[in-house]
Image: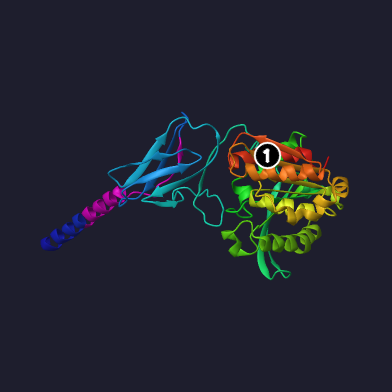
């Protein structure tokens, strides 16, 4: 009997010891690395676990910084006094550019490499205490071009409870982006919410389509075949579907198209060739079309001016596309096409384009 008691006691001690070891192992086992951390004093800490890496750095709109390796294999950097804003950044690990694996907020794109740091402030794109619209997702098969397509649709605050019709804006993304970029990174929906709430912009429906109906065009953002396929899908499939599903106000006076970079090429090419459907056309830092692509509009300035309520083009002083934008503006002037051209501070970047959208929206549907 005594031997049984001793054996039982030994078993209990062994179980307790194993439980203690297991508990200690759990304590020592590190959880997932979260990044970035925004501190109360305005500092921001970025982290990534890469125990075998030789060199890790951070690049992007949040600045360029080298990270320091800790004993636990976690590389980190704390950046002082980051101002409120929306920043894109990437990690470079031994020469490989990548997203921050500790951050679920990613910039959509054809080859995603950018994570998003958002520090709320009081900018046009910030989430504010105002009525908010709704962002809808649509996937559809475009029989016209035999492709599965995706798009976002924004409806303004109060759409679900009202019975009125609304004007429609087509808003296009750039070469490396996707149909989701204007929402996830451009915050177009918050810009619209804020401008509508302040009375600076008219309530409107916004269509954001995929600008690469030909996937191979990702290697050439100026591909005329891609622009033409987008035009066909937009005019003959996407817009008719949106008009069927949503309360879109009829008439060209209630249609606008604008885009950034490659999307600027698309908006100028499609808009100036479809003036029976669009009275408002804009472009942000556009990869401008060849004059031959818009020759009809240039050759018939009187009719073009009669049909256009607004042709609005903007580009940054440090933008690598500024030269060709100036050449395009010169062609418009030579042809007698009325337009507005704005040159601002800034490079070929999203902070500039968010500002342009906030400038453009109050000008349309007036």
Q: Residue furthest left?
A: 3
Name the image quarter holding the N terminus: bottom left
Whole-percent x and y of residue 101?
A: 44, 51
Whole-percent x and y of residue 147?
A: 66, 68
Q: Quadrant of residue 235?
A: bottom right
Whole-percent x and y of residue 287?
A: 65, 50
Q: Quadrant of residue 228?
A: bottom right
Please tell me which residue is depicted at 38% across the width and 38% down the height of the picture: 77
Q: Quadrant of residue 333?
A: top right
Query: Which one is in front, 301 or 160?
Result: 301
| Residue 36 in magenta stretch | yes
Q: Is residue 272 visible?
A: yes
Question: From what the image shows, is residue 176 above or below residue 233?
Answer: above
How many marks the image carries: the answer is 1
Whole-percent x and y of residue 102?
A: 44, 48
Query: On the rendered structure, is 141 left or right of 236?
Result: left
| Residue 149 in magenta stretch | no
Query: On the rendered structure, is 341 left or right of 56?
Result: right
Query: Which one is in front, 74 or 255?
Result: 255
Q: How is the image coloured?
A: rainbow
Label 1: state its secondary structure: helix
Q: Is residue 131 visible?
A: no
Please tell me which residue is depicted at 55% across the width and 49% down the height of the picture: 107
Residue position marked by numbered label 1 in the rendering: 356
Query: On the rendered structure, is 70 left or right of 360?
Result: left
Query: On the rendered structure, is 214 left or right of 334?
Result: left
* Residue range (magenta): 15-38
Pointer 1 local density, CA inside 10 Å: few below 14, some 14–19, many at least 20: many
Query: Which one is in front, 19 or 228?
Result: 228
Please tell me which residue is depicted at 45% across the width and 48% down the height of the picture: 100
């Amino acid at each position: 009997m005594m031997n049984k008691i001793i054996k039982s006691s030994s078993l209990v001690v062994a179980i307790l010891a194993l439980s203690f070891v297991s508990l200690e192992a759990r304590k020592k086992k590190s959880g997932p690395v979260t990044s970035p951390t925004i501190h109360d004093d305005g500092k921001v800490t970025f982290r990534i676990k890469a125990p075998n890496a030789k060199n890790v750095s951070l690049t992007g709109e949040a600045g360029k910084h080298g990270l320091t390796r800790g004993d636990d294999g976690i590389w980190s950097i704390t950046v002082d006094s980051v101002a409120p804003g929306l920043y894109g950044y990437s990690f470079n690990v031994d020469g490989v550019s990548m997203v921050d694996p500790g951050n679920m907020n990613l910039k959509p794109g054809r080859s995603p490499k950018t994570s998003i740091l958002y520090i709320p402030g009081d900018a046009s794109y910030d989430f504010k205490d105002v009525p908010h619209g709704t962002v809808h997702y649509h996937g559809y098969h475009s029989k016209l071009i035999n492709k599965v397509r995706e798009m976002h649709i924004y409806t303004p605050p109060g759409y679900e409870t009202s019975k009125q019709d609304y004007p429609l804006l087509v808003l296009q993304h750039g070469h490396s982006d996707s149909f989701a970029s204007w929402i996830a990174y451009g915050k177009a929906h918050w810009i619209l919410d804020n401008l509508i709430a302040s009375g600076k912009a008219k309530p409107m429906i916004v269509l954001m389509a995929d600008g690469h109906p030909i996937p191979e065009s990702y290697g050439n953002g100026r591909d005329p075949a891609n622009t033409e396929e987008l035009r066909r899908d937009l005019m003959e499939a996407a817009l008719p579907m949106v008009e069927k599903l949503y309360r879109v106000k009829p008439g060209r006076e209630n249609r606008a198209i604008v885009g950034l970079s490659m999307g600027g090429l698309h908006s100028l090419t499609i808009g100036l060739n479809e003036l029976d459907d669009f009275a408002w056309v804009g472009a942000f830092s556009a990869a401008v079309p060849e004059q031959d692509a818009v020759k009809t509009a240039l050759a018939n300035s009187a009719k073009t001016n009669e049909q256009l309520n607004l042709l609005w083009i903007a580009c940054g002083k440090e933008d690598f596309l500024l030269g060709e934008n100036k050449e395009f503006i010169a062609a418009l002037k030579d042809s007698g096409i009325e337009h507005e051209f704005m040159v601002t501070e800034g490079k070929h970047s999203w902070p500039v384009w968010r500002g342009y959208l906030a400038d453009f929206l109050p000008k349309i549907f007036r």
